Every structure is written in C-alpha cells, then in structure tokens.
Amino acid sequence: MTDLFEAEATTTTSLDLRRLQRSKRRAARRRMTLLVTAVAVVVLTIGGSVAYSFLQGFESTEEAIQDYEGAGQGNIQVVIPEGATGTDMAATLLEDGVIASTEAFMEAWNANPDASSVQPGYYYMHKEMKAEYALDALLDPSNKDVRTITAVEGKSLDYYKQAIANLTGASQDEVQAAMDNTEALGLPEEANGNLEGWLFPDTYTFDPGVTPQEVLTAMVQRTINVLDKHNVKPEDRERVLTVASLVEREAKKDEDRAKIASVIYNRVDADMKLELDSTVKYLSPTEGVWTTDEERAIDSPYNTYMYPGLPPGPIAGAGEKSIEAAINPAETDYLFFVTVNLKTGETKYATEYADHLANVQELRDWAAANSTSTDE
C-alpha cells in the first residue's frame, strides 16, 4: 500500500511540473508574439512614415510652380492689348514662350504693387524669362516699341504732312488723302473743312503700323480737348485758333503772348489792318522774318497788309500758351508792336504811331549793327 501511495504522489508532482513548464512556455511565446508584433508595428510605422514623406516630396515636386531662372534669351515682340488683365497677360506671355507658367507670372503679379500700371502696346522681350523679370520688362517704358512724332508749334499743314509721312512710311499723297477726308478725322463743323490750325502741336506716341488717319485724328482730338479745357464755345473755336496762330507766329517770348493778342484785338476793334508779316509768310513761305513789297502785295484774304480784320482761318498750329493768350489777352491800349532785337526777342509796344516808328527805327539800327537787311 505504501508503495502504491508513494508512486501516485510522484506522478502527481511530475504532472504539475509539466503543466507549470507548459504554462511558462505559453507565457514566453505570448511575450515573444507581443514583442514581434510591437516590433512589426514600429517597423511598419517608420516605413510608412518614410514612404509617406517620399510620396509627399514627389507630389510636392509635381505641384511646384514652373518658372524659368534667368533673364531669358533671344528676342520677341509681345502685344499687350487694351484692357488686358493680369491673367490675360500671363496667357499671352505663356503662348509666346516668354514664361514657363501662368501661375508663376500671377504670383509675381500679386506680389508687385505696380503690376496694374502695365500699359497696352508692343514690347520687346526675351523668351524663357523668369516671370518676375517678365513683369519688370512690361513695367519698363523703354521696352515699348512705339512710333513718336513731335509736332512743333507755329508750323503749317505742309510741315505736318511731311512729319506724318516720315512717321508712318506713307507717301505725301497718301497723307494728303487722309487730310482731305476731314469728316473721318472728326474735324468739327466750325472749321469749315479747313484742317489748318486744328493739328495740335505736341509729342505723340503710337503703336507700330499707325496710319496717317490715326495720327491726324489724334491731333485734331487733342485740339478739341484743349479748347474744351478752356471752356471755348464751339462757335468761338475758329476765331480763337486764328488769333492764337497769329500770336504763335509773332511772339518770341511767353511774356509777350497776351500783349500781342491784345494788340490784335485792339486793331480789329478799331477796324485797322493788322499788317502782320506772319500772314504774308503764310502766303509766301520764304526764309527769314522780312517780307518784300511784292509779297505784301499778294492779293489774298490772308494778306493782313491788304485786308482789315482777321484772316479767314488759322495760319499755323498754336500751342496751349498761345491759345490761352487768345482767350485771355492782356488789357492794354496798344495798337502797335515790333520785335526790336531778333536775337533776344525783345519786343516793344506803342499806342501812338510816332512811338511805334521810333521802335521800328530801333529794329533797323539793330539790324544794321548785326548785318541783317530790312529791305527784303
């Protein structure tokens, strides 16, 4: 019996030991499984992060705004139309190969407070320009391709005709044809179809390919604008321009314009002949300031030695200062004036004819001293 009980005891202890060992092994396996799982999670997390970063970098590269780096190469003419927006300009520049993307240009546009001051016109630019540089080029007036004409004060239609021909490349006959179509130029009715005096002297700029009609229309419109600026009524425009043209041709200094205008009005009011050499020069455009007896005998309503009052129309393009003088003449009693020094432009005035003759003699003395003849 004892042996039997002892054998059973030994067997029970062994079983318990084996159960304990198996339990430890299961616990160890669970710990290993948890460890491996944790490691796997860490590895996957790190790997996913790296992969995500890589993909993000790839996507960022794909989404980066395309732009050129330098100032570009080669030459190209770009046309910016009237009323173009920044987006319109970007599309034009992209199509012409100037910029790499519209996004780059608009980014530069939004960062530049002067961007909206880009003017329409033709521009000299390069291809493959950095968008910022392309915008700078559009803001630089020196990059514009323009045609410039300066209409000088005191000149008549023949002078302007040649200047317009030179500007546009048209022949004088073609310019004359444009001049004859005064209705197309917007010449007001009060001009009676006479373009003389209605081409305002100024500097004008045009796009390449400008036509004589476009130049003439701009000059006529500028004259109307100046007259409107000074509140000249339509019925007074021709008279004002006529007096202003006489002032323009006779005055040598700005300070004399209003006084010469007063002499003109005073003589007209007194029904006196103006006797202005400038009107004779209009009929016979010879060199110098003097006129001959033969020239002063030309029978024409423009000859103010022969006919009293104003000539029938302007004799030249008058600048704004002469127009202002014709509108607001000085208040004087002068009936005579003469420039006594042709170099300095000094001009003297008189109410009495005897005083005027003394001033004329001063001119003759000056001319004699300077070897300038007054006998022409």
Image (cartoon, grey):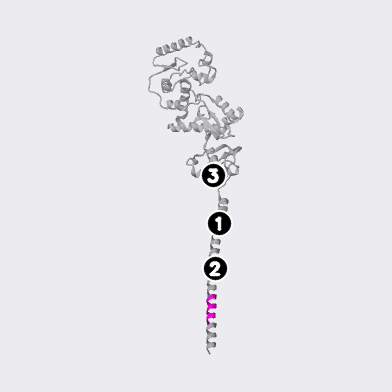
Residue in view at x 55 percent, y 30 percent: 148
Total labels drawn: 3
Residue type at mark 2: give it.
Met
Pointer 2 local density, CA inside 10 Å: few below 14, some 14–19, many at least 20: few
Mark 3 residue type: Phe
* Region rendered in magenta: 12-21
In this view, 366 is above or below 43? above
Using the numbered discs, state the Cα–Cα distance from disc 2 to disc 3 in whole angstroms.
Answer: 60 Å
The disc at residue 105 is 3
User: Vertically, is 215 above or below 115?
Assistant: above
Label 1 vs 2, first from the N-terminus: 2
Dot 3 or dot 1: first in sequence order is 1
Q: Quick one: SS at disc 3?
A: helix
Residue 173 in percent (x, y) is at 61, 28
Q: Nearer the viewer, residue 127 or 227?
A: 127
Name which quarter of the figure residue 160 lies in.
top right
Q: Is residue 337 left or right of residue 70?
A: left
Query: For the residues carrying marks 2 and 3, which lies nearer the camera in this image?
Result: 2
Please, what is the dominant secondary structure of the magenta stretch? helix
Q: What secondary structure is marked by label 2?
A: helix
The residue type indicated by label 1 comes to Val
The residue mark sitting in front, 3 or 1, is 1
Q: Position of residue 240 (x, y in %)?
A: 45, 27
Eye-nearest disc, 1 or 2: 2
Residue 74, how many percent across, how many down?
61, 37
Identify the residue position indicated by label 1 in the image.
50
Q: Which mark is residue 340?
A: none
Spot occupied by residue 78 in the image (x, y as percentages of width and height): 58, 39
How far is disc 1 from disc 2 in space, using C-alphas? 27 Å
Identify the disc placed on residue 32. Answer: 2
